[in-house]
Image (cartoon, helix red, strand yellow):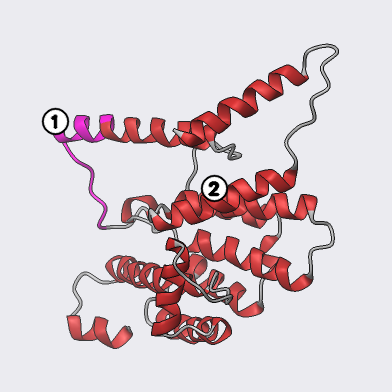
Amino acid sequence: RTVEDIYNILQISKTRRKLPGVNIPPPKAKIMAAYYEKLTNLFWVSENYLFHAFAWYKYYSLCKEFNRGMSAEMKRMQASAVLLAALCIPTTNSEKGGRGATKPLGRDAIQSTVEDDIAKEKMARMATLLGFHTTEPSRDAILAEIRSRNIVEDVPDYLRELYVILEDNTDPLDMVEKARSLLDTLRAETGVTAETEQDAKKEEEGDADDGEDHTLAKYVEPLTNVLILKLIFNLSAAYHTISLDHVRGLT
């Protein structure tokens, strides 16, 4: 409801600025950046990783617009957060066109289609209310935008390698081994331990009382989940049967 109210206020302001003799400045980028920063926390707590990533992208873009003197370290941290947020968005087998994907038949197919249409309509409306650049937000859409804006160039080398592994590597026999060392680097860079992960969760709930920034630390766990999910998808595409012991060995 709050998001809709803010959207309506922005639309009214935009309409009034077009009237002759009316001199109303558009909302400052700094104010809008603060708005999207709040949304990144809101969507993270609700585990809506898709909109969390889009909110981070908007926040990063607005910060670059109003903060021309942004330090290289801050720029790197924000670009890293945008990329990691996008990589945390889970994929489904059907989205990747995996061999195991099946389509419902008969009445189930009709029900599934109706539910999908309703979900897409709700998602499109929310994307419009939030001012995203597309009415069809998806993992592929946000990653395409990241590539087109060359945001990947602003992140550390090990995160670029992690991006390539998660997006381009289809060899299940070595992807986990390669990604594990990069995730260990992310843990080391952010100081992730059981305690700091708990602190990060407290920060999201507004209960943390220290000044440490665990912005990137919180992505380790969901990235691990995405990596395991991708491993299972790739194994299902490469093998008809596989033992659990072999899967454990790969992880």
Rendering coords of residue 237 (x, y %): 31, 65
Relative to residue 177, is residue 101 drawn left or right?
Answer: left
Relative to residue 20, is residue 157 drawn left or right?
Answer: left
What residue do we see at 83% from left, 22% from top? Answer: 23
Rendering coords of residue 160 (x, y %): 61, 73
Foreground of the two, 47 or 101: 47
What residue do we see at 38% from left, 51% from top? Answer: 95
Which quarter of the image is occupied by the C terminus?
A: bottom left
The question of residue 4 being in magenta is answered with no
Q: Mark 1 vs mark 2: which is more N-terminal? A: 1
Which residue carries the number 2 mark?
A: 141
Foreground of the two, 139 or 243: 139
The question of residue 107 being in magenta is answered with yes
Q: Is residue 144 visible?
A: no
- Occupied quadrant, residue 128: top right
Toward the top, the furthest residue is 20
Residue type at tag 2: Ala
Q: Is residue 20 visible?
A: yes
Reply above or below: 29 against 106: below
What residue do we see at 79% from left, 50% from top? Answer: 66
Q: Is label 1 in a helix, a strand or a loop?
A: helix
Highlighted range, magenta: 100-114
Considering the whole magenta stretch, tell me its main secondary structure. Answer: helix
Residue type at tag 1: Arg
Which quarter of the image is occupied by the N terminus?
A: top left
Which residue carries the number 1 mark?
A: 107
What residue do we see at 37% from left, 76% from top? Answer: 172
Q: CA distance from mark 1 to mark 2?
A: 31 Å
Rendering coords of residue 119 (x, y %): 34, 35
